[in-house]
Image: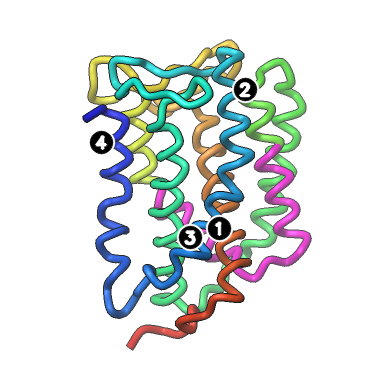
């Protein structure tokens, strides 16, 4: 079993097991999750394929099974299912356990979006930084502009998933193993790393999480099985 596959399975294992908990039953919402996950994965995979071909990043065959689709390992495709599943499950559980959450999230998203757009524009010579910061910046401003009602839970979900993100992405970028699973061309990023993780990955991960949550909530509205904001008894 490849290293990358093990990382994917580790990320999804606990959320998957707790999906059947009688007070959560996230398994009843797999269909809206899958629709949102696929819709999010499409632009990310196109982005991934293009950047892989351009050499912005790449994959170490020693940590892969060897099966590739459009030049990318199958484990990379699983990544866009396993990580979103874990994060959307976390969001779902938080909404049930914490039905009321009042943070100045809209202001945070507006300021964050403006800052990321600015940084993206002044880093135009670095493809990973520019595309990631601009994409997340525009998405954050859009969420703030439409007054999305779930911004506080989105932000809390992201903060809670930062630790597992750093553990998972740390392994993928070479922490605790002899060679990285995913390598990066530092000419295309800021060269700032948290351990072995490029700083851009934290913004990339935020965009992936928030897009999945946004589409999940959109599709969930026509798929109500449980009152999501009802506190657990």
Mark 4, mark 3: which one is toward the viewer? 4
Q: Earlier in the sequence, mark 3 or mark 1?
A: 1
Question: Crowding near pointer 1: few (<14 within 10 Å), some, many (20+)?
Answer: some
Point out the tag, 4 or 2, that comes first from the N-terminus. 4
Q: Which quadrant is the N terminus positioned in?
A: top left
Residue at the spot 42% in from the left edge and 54% down from the top edge: 85
The residue that disc 2 covers is 50
Residue positioned 59% across, 48% down in the render? 40
Q: Residue at x 63, y 26 (%)?
A: 129
11 left or right of 222? left
Can you give x and y, in whole percent of width and height, for residue 69 in the image? 48, 26
Q: Residue 198, how many percent across, how many down?
A: 48, 26
- With 223 as the anchor, is 115 left or right in this view? right
Q: Quickly name the residue at label 4.
A: 6
Mark pair 1, 4: CA separation:
25 Å
Residue holding disc 1: 35
Residue plotted at (49% across, 64% down): 31
From the viewer's perspective, is the residue at label 2 or at label 3 nearer? 2
| Element carrying mark 3 | helix
Q: CA distance from mark 4 to mark 3?
A: 27 Å
CA separation in Å, label 2 and label 3: 32 Å
Q: For this view, does 94 lie left or right of residue 223?
A: left
Q: Residue 156 bears which disc, if any? A: 3
9 in magenta = no
Q: Nearer the viewer, mark 3 or mark 1?
A: 1
Q: Residues within 10 Å of mark 2 (few under 14, many from 20)?
A: few
Does the magenta stretch mainly form a helix, a strand or a loop? helix
Spatial CA span between label 4 and label 2: 25 Å
Give the residues drawn in magenta, as a range: 135-161
Q: Is 145 in front, or is 59?
A: 59
């Amino acid at each position: 079993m490849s290293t990358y596959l093990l990382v994917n399975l580790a990320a999804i294992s606990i959320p998957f097991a707790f999906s059947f908990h009688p007070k959560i039953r996230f398994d009843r919402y797999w269909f809206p999750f899958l629709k949102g996950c696929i819709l999010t994965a499409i632009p990310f995979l196109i982005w991934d394929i293009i950047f892989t071909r351009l050499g912005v990043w790449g994959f170490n065959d020693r940590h892969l099974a060897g099966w590739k689709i459009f030049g990318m390992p199958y484990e990379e495709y699983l990544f866009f299912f396993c990580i979103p599943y874990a994060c959307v499950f976390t969001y779902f559980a938080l909404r049930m356990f914490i039905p009321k959450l009042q943070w100045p999230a809209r202001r945070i998203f507006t300021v964050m979006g403006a800052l990321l757009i600015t940084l993206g524009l002044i880093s135009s010579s670095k493809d990973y930084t520019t595309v990631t910061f601009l994409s997340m910046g525009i998405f954050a401003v859009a969420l703030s502009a439409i007054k999305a009602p779930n911004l506080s839970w989105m932000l809390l979900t992201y903060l809670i998933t930062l630790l597992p993100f750093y553990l998972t992405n740390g392994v993928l970028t070479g922490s605790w193993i002899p060679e990285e699973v995913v390598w990066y061309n530092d000419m295309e990023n800021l060269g700032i790393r948290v351990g072995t993780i490029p700083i851009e990955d934290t913004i990339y991960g935020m965009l992936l999480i928030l897009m999945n949550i946004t589409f999940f909530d959109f599709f969930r509205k026509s798929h109500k099985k449980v009152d999501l904001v009802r506190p657990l008894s």
